[in-house]
Image (spheres, rainbow, N blue to C red):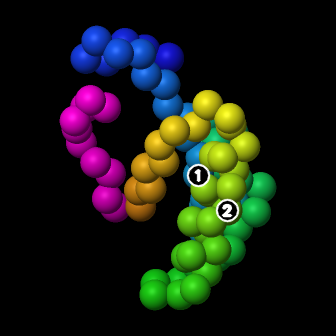
Amino acid sequence: DGRVGGFTSSAELYVHAKNPERVRSAWLRSKTLPVTHRPDWNDVRIVRAILSLIAEALKDARMTHILLCTESCVPITTLKE
């Protein structure tokens, strides 16, 4: 939790890894879902992976917003923006 722009914020990370066996960081592995859909580009399994991430995030009753990112598209902005 932290203070950003005068309001309290918190964030949690959930990771869907196409190849979880390749995740080397112990911290990142601890955030990785126990299931992988092994999606390919333009594949319905991408939707399944997204739904798995959302389902996991919504287990937290405090969840109010969900931001989806890909490994190549990470937003660079403040939480307030």
Q: Could you tell me which residue is drawn at 58 percent across and 86 percent down?
A: 44
Is residue 22 visible to the viewer in this orientation of the structure? no
In this rendered view, identify the residue nearer to me: 72 or 64: 64
Amino acid type, label 1: Val
Q: Residue at x 34, y 61 (%)?
A: 72
Q: Is disc 2 surrounded by few (<14), some (14 to 19) or many (20+) residues within 10 Å?
A: some
Question: Which residue was labeled with disc 1?
Answer: 15
Pointer 1 local density, CA inside 10 Å: few below 14, some 14–19, many at least 20? many
* Residue 61 percent location from the top left of the image: 68, 35
Residue 27 horizontal side relative to residue 75, left or right: right
Q: Which residue is mark 2?
A: 52
Instruction: Specify whether 25 is left or right of 35.
Output: left
Which segment is the magenta one?
A: 72-81
Residue at the spot 72% in from the left edge and 43% down from the top edge: 59
Residue 7 as seen in the image, left or right of residue 32 = left
What amino acid is at disc 2? Ser
Residue 54 in picture, x, y percent from top left: 61, 56
From this viewpoint, is residue 1 visible? yes
Q: Secondary structure at mark 2?
A: helix
Residue 79 colored in magenta in the image: yes
Instruction: Indicate whether residue 69 is drawn in magenta.
Output: no
Task: From the top left corner, tell me how far across and down residue 21 is, in percent.
Answer: 69, 60
Relative to 38, does residue 9 appear above or below in the rendering?
A: above
Image vertical order of residue 34 relative to residue 37, above or below? above
Secondary structure mostly seen in the magenta stretch: loop
Quadrant assignment for the C terminus:
top left
Name which of mark 1 and mark 2 comes first in the sequence: 1
| 5 in relation to 80, above or below | above
Q: Residue 8: x and y, percent?
A: 41, 16
Q: CA distance from mark 1 to mark 2?
A: 10 Å
Q: How many marks?
A: 2
